[in-house]
Image (tube, rainbow, N blue to C red):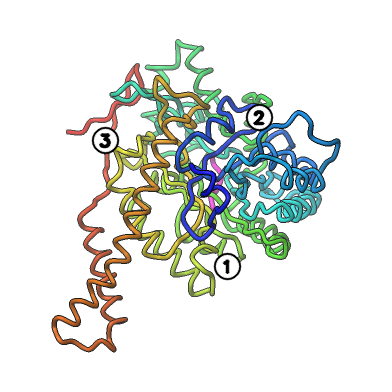
Amino acid sequence: MSEIYNQNWNRERVRAGMRWFGPEDIVTIRNIQQTPGVTNIITALHHIPAGEIWTEDEIAKRKIEVEFQPLEDAPDRSGMELYRWYQANGTRTGLIWDTAESLVFTEDIKNGSPNREKHIRNYKTSLQNLGRFGVNNVVGNFMLVADWTRTSMAELPDGSKTLKYIHSAFAAFDIFLLKRHESVEGYIQDGSFSAEEVEEARKYFDTYLANHPERQQELIDMITAGLPGAQEGFTLDDFRAAVAKYEGMSLEVLQEHIAYFLDAVVPVASAAGVRLCCHADDPAFSPFLGTPRAVGGSAGYKFLLDHGCGVNMCIGSLMANESNRDITGVIREIAEYGRMKGLSIDEVFPHIHLRPIETDGKNFREGHHAEHREELAKVVHTLVDLGWQGVFRPDHAPQSDHGFGCPGYDLIGRGYGAQLLLGLFEMAEIIKTTRFRAVEAAIRASGGDMARKEEAFEAARQAEAEKIGRKIPFIKVPFAFGEQGVVARLD
């Protein structure tokens, strides 16, 4: 990307971002800098324990790591003073850190323990510190225990590797490895699984896991990887203890805890110039591990908007649930609710993840962006039609033989995804612009009343949205699983 573009970075357009896990990430800032079209970094201070303060010194270090070329002769300064020095003397990378994902909503906040007061105070301070450095989007989530859940990697027909979730594998983990209940009836009674799903889990365990301790450990490692702080190492006992904190909690009680937290921190975030937003449950199934989930669709997001929290729309997380398969309808419903509350579209959706999945409504795997361009085009058209101008990231992508990165975060795959999505956004903007000219020309040609052109514009917009909705259906791919992972049957 050109130095001129870097120096004249324009916030008033859609920007592509990429997640970076800090200096320990195998993907470097230079790698991302050389990924055409990517201008924004989405990162967090992963080395600071959840609930502790993100200090100005640590935020400044990360801003400098992202936004400036390394220097050996930097002065012995810290915090804002050091950042200002780099602004005056450093060489920019052309990247910007303006979205923090995640400043964790801690388990103490979610379960309402007495320690939440300390965590809320620290959260407020962190928000204020981030605001001073222009990190004006902050993401968290209200998933209990696990931030996200996959069961293993799958090999796609082209040889790429991707993340997958097989429901019977997860049920086998919960019932026969985690053993939250003494009998299978407990899982049926708490709503985790149906009797049929319990039987499927038993077959999966007997076939793939019972005589293979190494596979059991692989499944445990994959699922516990979604726990906050998982890099520190989690045992099954740790997992059971974390789940036990929520035993018997209802959705209503969880929402009380969520409201208590948001009502305390959102005013502080707003005063600091920061927009707080929440990621969807991933996957958007409830209950999960016997616990309630609050953000699995439009109803959950309306509740958050009622308490001033924005939407980190993640289409892949939501579309895993059959009720969210018409994802453009979900987006429009949430956008309209936010509009009724006086919010701009960018305030409703401060940050968006555009990740395609293949699913049968229970199992899913993540796919290449280019192979799902039809449904991504439908989502992008909807966002442009609503006037959204924000930061998106392609989120996860399969890993190719020539790629590298953490599972789901292959640099090459994400780069392909970002470039495809940027092209879709540009084309949608062109279509939106030409729509109005076409309507005006049609009115003039027919001798119609130009005073009613706004009404005609709206009718054209509605007709176009309905046509695209009919023309580009969502792809549903049935699954079969075997020794080599998930195999999609397209027949």
Q: How many marks?
A: 3
Say which residue label 1 marks. Answer: 306
The residue to which callout 3 is attached is: 478
* N-terminal-most mark, 2 or 3: 2
Q: Residue furthest toward the right? A: 76
Q: Position of residue 360 (x, y in %)?
A: 31, 39
Query: What's the magenta region?
Result: 289-294
Q: Earlier in the sequence, mark 1 or mark 3?
A: 1
Instruction: Report the residue that reaches farthest toward the left.
Output: 446
State the SS at label 3.
loop
Secondary element type, mark 2:
loop
Contact (Cβ within 8 Å) of mark 1 with mark 3: no
Other residues around mark 2 within 10 Å, as few (<14) / some (14–19) / many (≥20): few
The span from disc 1 to disc 2 (Cα, nearest Å) is: 37 Å
Q: Main secondary structure of the magenta part?
A: loop
Would you say 481 lies left or right of 217 here? left
Look at label 2 and name its amino acid: Pro
**Residue 265: x %, y % from top left:** 71, 59
Q: Is residue 448 visible?
A: yes
